Image (cartoon, rainbow, N blue to C red):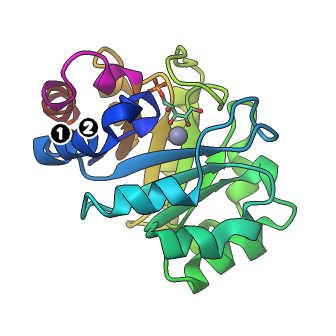
């Protein structure tokens, strides 16, 4: 089980301090949401900020690319210090080429699925990915409500991973996760939990500890 706080909801005037707080409280990964204003309506930040984050933590950087054709920027994010790069199936013309390139660059490769996207798109690339990311909301913004049907999607991926003996596949869930529904997504089979607003509203360190308690 891993917890990956999404920095999108952090106080950006104190980014370093906010990362240190969640890092010290036991966060496993640091989740960084890259948005381009094309694939999703919102724009966030790019490799320069990832590089700055790299300088204040040793935790793996879990970079979630919500951009069109992310293959164009993989080298940049590698240089910035990314450990895991997750791309959206809906944003890649050549998904297999993109995930292969991520691994060639010696990073872990993740594939994210929008709420309406079927798990079938993963059928022929399960062996080529390290992580499947189930979006609990439509990507673009923090603070939205979890779509309950995504529990079934998590269960399906968990079952496929079991059937195929993919013991190391990480099943990440992102969007709308709170202290109230985290146990349900863990029970469904998610093993990497992303949370943004639920961690950075109030005391981030305490919230991380509370999440960890409810995950195990
Ligand atoms: C949404 C982002 C999420 C977001 C999660 O498009 O990918 O990582 O920051 O925020 P919450 O946890 O508030 O839904
Ligand atoms: Zn994300």
Q: Main secondary structure of the magenta part?
A: helix
Residue in view at x 73 percent, y 44 percent:
36
Classify mark 2: helix, strand or loop: helix
The residue carrying mark 1 is: 21
**In screen coordinates, is 143 left or right of 125?**
left
Compared to residue 83, the image places residue 155 above or below, namely above
Looking at the image, the residue that sits furthest to the bottom is 104
**In screen coordinates, is 107 left or right of 22?**
right
Which is nearer the eye, 128 or 209?
209
Q: Are marks 2 and 1 in contact (CB under 8 Å)?
A: yes
| CA neighbours of label 2 inside 10 A, class few (<14), some (14 to 19), many (20+) | some
The residue carrying mark 2 is: 18
Classify mark 1: helix, strand or loop: helix
Residue in view at x 18 percent, y 35 percent:
212
Give the image location of residue 146, x and y in percent.
Answer: 52, 19
Compared to residue 55, the image places residue 143 above or below, namely above
Which is nearer the eye, 152 or 6?
6
Start-end of magenta stretch: 197-206
Q: CA distance from mark 2 to mark 1?
A: 5 Å
Report whether residue 195 is seen: no
């Amino acid at each position: 089980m891993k917890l990956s706080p999404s920095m999108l909801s952090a106080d950006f005037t104190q980014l370093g301090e906010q990362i240190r707080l969640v890092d010290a409280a036991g966060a496993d990964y640091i989740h960084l949401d890259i948005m381009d204003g094309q694939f999703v309506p919102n724009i966030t930040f790019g490799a320069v900020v990832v590089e700055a984050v790299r300088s204040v933590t040793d935790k793996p950087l879990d970079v979630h690319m919500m951009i069109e054709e992310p293959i164009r920027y993989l080298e940049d994010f590698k240089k910035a210090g990314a450990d895991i790069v997750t791309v959206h199936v809906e944003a890649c013309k050549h998904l297999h080429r993109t995930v292969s390139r991520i691994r060639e660059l010696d990073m872990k490769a993740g594939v994210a699925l929008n709420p309406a996207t079927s798990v079938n798109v993963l059928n022929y690339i399960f062996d080529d990915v390290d992580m499947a990311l189930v979006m609990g909301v439509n990507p673009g913004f923090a603070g939205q409500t979890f779509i309950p049907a995504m529990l079934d999607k998590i269960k399906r991926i968990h079952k496929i991973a079991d059937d195929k003996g993919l013991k190391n596949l990480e099943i990440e869930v992102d969007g709308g996760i709170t202290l109230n529904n985290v146990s349900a997504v863990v029970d469904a089979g998610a093993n990497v939990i992303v949370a943004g607003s639920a961690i950075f509203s109030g005391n981030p360190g305490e919230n991380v500890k509370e999440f960890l308690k409810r995950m195990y």
